[in-house]
Image (tube, helix red, strand yellow):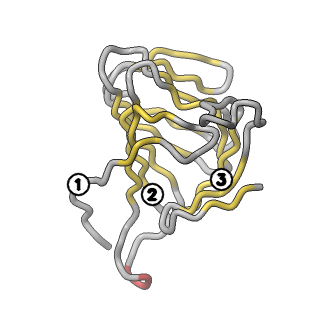
């Protein structure tokens, strides 16, 4: 049980499948003590740089994305323009991704029903030196920062 004021923003680097150094993100979980905190919700905030995209990927968890500007959202087989205020509900297992085709950075918030998020990439924004690697999969612990690749 906590109120988190503000966010610490980091560049989108370090993930071999989603390397976007012009974009930034902030991971938000309840920092409270173990027996009095919310452990089944997490928020990922992003500022997607102009021309950048979240590569097509899937999760084992449901997700909700709050869009704060214009972009192109791929959800399953459909691609649709989204505007500021759009809310995208993504069922577990459905491929999705988002491109900032606007003229300014695109803020979004992604809400998950867990602090441990499994992801499998379908497409990549390959980090330098990994361009020939296949898309990966793994579990990210947003509370600790630990990654366990499949």
Q: For numbered disc 1, what is the local secondary structure?
A: loop
Quadrant of residue 58 in the image?
top right
The structure residue drawn at horizontal position 73% and vertical position 37%, both measured from the top left corner, is 135
Q: Nearer the viewer, residue 9 or 37?
A: 9
Q: Residue 56 location in percent, x, y?
A: 63, 30
**Badge 2 local density, few (<14 within 10 Å), some, or many (20+)?**
many
Residue closest to the eye, 92 or 4: 4
Q: Name the spot of residue 62 as percent of width and height, x first.
A: 58, 47
Please name the residue that numbered disc 2 is placed on.
42
The circle on residue 118 is 3
Mark positioned earlier in the residue sequence (3 or 1): 1
Label 2 SS: strand
Indicate which disc residue 6 carries: 1
Is 133 or 110 nearer to us in this picture?
133
Q: Residues within 10 Å of mark 3 (few under 14, many from 20)?
A: some
Instruction: Check disc 3 and report its element: helix, strand or loop.
Output: strand
């Amino acid at each position: 049980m906590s109120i988190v004021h503000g966010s610490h923003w980091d560049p989108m680097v370090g993930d071999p499948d989603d390397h976007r150094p012009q974009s930034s993100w902030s991971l938000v979980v309840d920092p409270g003590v173990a027996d009095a905190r919310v452990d089944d919700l997490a928020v990922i905030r992003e500022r997607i740089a102009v021309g950048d995209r979240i590569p097509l990927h899937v999760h084992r968890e449901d997700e909700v994305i709050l869009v704060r500007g214009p972009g192109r959202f791929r959800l399953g087989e459909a691609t649709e323009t989204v505007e500021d205020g759009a809310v995208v509900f993504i069922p577990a297992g459905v491929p999705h991704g988002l491109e900032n085709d606007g003229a300014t950075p695109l803020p979004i918030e992604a809400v998950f029903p867990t602090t441990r998020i499994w992801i499998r990439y379908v497409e990549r924004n390959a980090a330098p030196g990994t361009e020939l690697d296949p898309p990966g999969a793994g579990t990210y612990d947003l509370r600790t920062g630990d990654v366990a690749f499949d």
